[in-house]
Image (cartoon, rainbow, N blue to C red):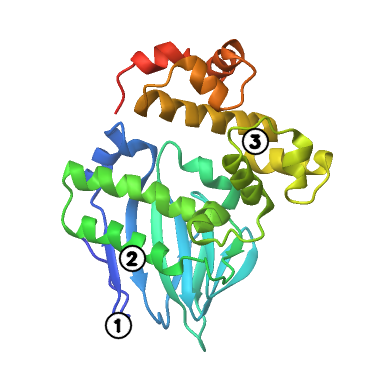
Amino acid sequence: MERKKDGFDGQRAIVLPQTIKDLLKSNELTSLLYITDIGFYPNANGHYRIRKEGAEQNILIYCTDGKGWISTNGTKHELKKEEFFIIEAGTPHSYGASEKEPWSIYWVHFTGEKSHLFNSIYNMVIRIDEAPEARFKDRLLMFEEIYRNLEMGYSSENLEYVTLCLWHFIASFRFISQYREVNKSKKGDIIQDAINYMRSNIEKRLSLEEIAGCVNYSASHFGQIFLKKTGHSPLNYFNQLKIQKACQMLDFSDMKIKEIANELGFYDQYHFSKTFFKITGETPTQYKKRNKG
């Protein structure tokens, strides 16, 4: 494997050969988004790059310690610990480490047919604020997973696996809040509290006012917040939870459709079947007959 030599103690880098990049570009799975270069430069004193014509790939630079700077389109940006910057392909740029506090950076060059889908975070400094749920270590573990698989060579399996990991890795920068969700405390989250209330009262016919009341909100205000957060109205979401429960009953019990409808608080079997079809696209009978798992 070709390796960059910059003279930083502990540096690591892999540059994929052109023949491998051609394979990535022609593979139906990897062509959408793939790595061409990857590395880690710790305490990179004297690190400097200039590309007057830009690079063929997008360049993600993630600073985990120290400081540095990135210049694009005539604007110089400072980059500090827990900040990242993605230089868009074709953008003339230069960057380098601070002389007094040289940065430590994880970097990835990536491209692909769908790499533009992340352009909302290109060419700007974005800070990843510190919080108990931040998952800084998890993100670096993903980097290591990508790097170590590339170290093992360029088999089709390795390249395809690395590509799938890359989607997740970049998504952890693009969707910071969603990436942290697994570690978030749900205490005080009105949406989660409302959903828990719905689940605890799955057999009832709750009104919007009752659901909003469980978190001490007015029905109209709560409905707006819930829709913005989930993409569904509270009552529609409640019906989805009911149908999810109904599917479990159809799968794991001998209850009749009429009994399930009654158990889950529907007016009658017709109302249940109509709601079931609206949400799943099939009738309860069709669902029960379908092979699953």
Q: Tell me which residue sits at (28%, 33%) in the image.
A: 26
Give whichever of discs 2 and 3 has the lower sequence position: 2
Q: Which residue is the site of mark 2?
A: 39
CA–CA distance between discs 1 and 3?
A: 49 Å
Q: Amino acid at mark 2?
A: Gly
Query: Quick check: marks 2 and 3 in contact, CB under 8 Å?
Result: no
Q: Earlier in the sequence, mark 1 or mark 3?
A: 1
Q: Inspect the image, locate mark 1, and give the three-letter code of the amino acid beneath it.
A: Asp
- Do the CB atoms of the residues marked 1 and 3 lie less than 8 Å apart? no
Check the image and report above or below for 89 versus 198: below
- Where is residue 92 drawn, in percent x and y? 54, 56
In whole angstroms, how far apart are the C-alphas of marks 2 and 3? 39 Å
Neighbor class of circle 1 (other Cα within 10 Å; few <14, some 14-19, many 20+) is few
Q: Position of residue 233 (x, y in %)?
A: 69, 33
- Determine which of the numbered discs, if any, sits on residue 150 in the image: none
Q: Quadrant of residue 146?
A: bottom left
The residue that appears at 65% across and 36% down in the rendered structure is 231
The vertical placement of 280 against 164, above or below, is: above
Report the amino acid beneath label 3: Gly
**Marks 1/2: CA distance?**
13 Å
Q: For mark 1, what is the residue? A: 9
Q: Residue at x 62, y 58 (%)?
A: 73
Crowd tier of the residue under label 3, counting other residues whose Cα lies within 10 Å: few below 14, some 14–19, many 20 or above = few
Query: Quarter of the image containing the N terminus?
Result: bottom left
Q: Is residue 19 above or below residue 151?
A: above
Q: Secondary structure at mark 2?
A: strand
Query: Where 63 falls versus 98 (above or below)?
Result: above
Q: Secondary structure at mark 1?
A: loop
At which x and y percent is residue 232?
A: 65, 33
Residue ID for mark 3: 231
Report x, y in % for residue 207: 74, 33
